[in-house]
Image (tube, rainbow, N blue to C red):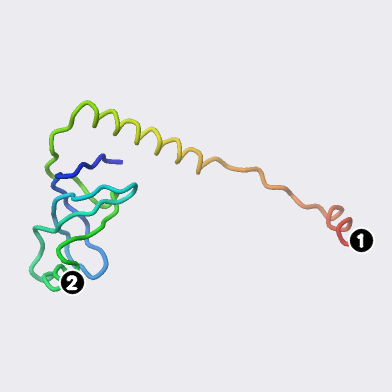
């Protein structure tokens, strides 16, 4: 997952009532999404953008960084930590659990 920081210029995919992709600046970073101010968009989406008050919350997976603000060593460490946590979470989610098989005998015992 890409590490976003406030001030990054980002391109986001269309969603909801928007018919075209758009670009803007990151204003706030959440766990799985970012809030951005929409600055460059297709004229056909003008009414929808105005309804959104020129802001949108988009998934991090559907956004790409066009121009990043300078990162410090602290930022890089935090990004590495987030990626490690995300990998551990994904590994835990993919871990299969053993299901109990019910047998006819067990079912008969419960019926009595």
- Identify the image quadrant of residue 54: bottom left
Instruction: Estimate the x, y position of residue 75 in percent, counting from the top left.
Output: 24, 32
- Tag count: 2
Residue holding disc 1: 112
Query: With respect to residue 46, does 58 lie above or below?
Result: above
Q: CA distance from mark 1 to mark 2?
A: 64 Å
Residue most extreme to the right: 112
Q: Residue at x 22, y 26 (%)?
A: 73
Give me the disc on residue 74: none
User: Which of the two discs, 1 and 2, sits closer to the camera?
Assistant: 2
SS for callout 1: loop
- The location of residue 53, given as percent across then percent down, is 16, 66
The x and y percentages for residue 86 are 39, 39
Give the numbered dot on residue 51.
2
Instruction: Name the residue furthest bottom.
Output: 47
Pointer 1 with pointer 2, Cβ within 8 A: no
Left or right side of 42 for 103: right
- In which quarter of the view is residue 51 placed? bottom left
Which quadrant of the figure contains the N terminus?
A: top left
Residue that appears at 23% across and 70% down: 17
> Which is nearer the N-term, disc 1 or disc 2?
2
| Residue depicted at 84% across the width and 53% down the height | 106
Q: Give the residue displayed 17% in from the left and 64% down from the top.
A: 20
Task: Please provide percent x and percent y for residue 96.
Answer: 58, 42
């Amino acid at each position: 997952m890409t590490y976003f920081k406030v001030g990054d210029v980002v391109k986001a995919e269309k969603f909801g009532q928007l018919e075209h992709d758009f670009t803007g600046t990151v204003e706030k970073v959440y766990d799985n999404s970012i809030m951005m101010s929409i600055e460059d968009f297709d004229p056909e989406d003008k009414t929808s953008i105005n309804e959104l008050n020129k802001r949108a919350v988009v998934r991090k997976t559907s956004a790409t960084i066009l121009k990043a603000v300078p990162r410090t060593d602290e930022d890089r460490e935090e990004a590495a930590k987030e990626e490690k946590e995300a990998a551990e979470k994904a590994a835990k989610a993919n871990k299969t659990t053993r299901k109990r098989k019910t047998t006819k005998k067990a079912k008969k015992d419960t019926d009595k």
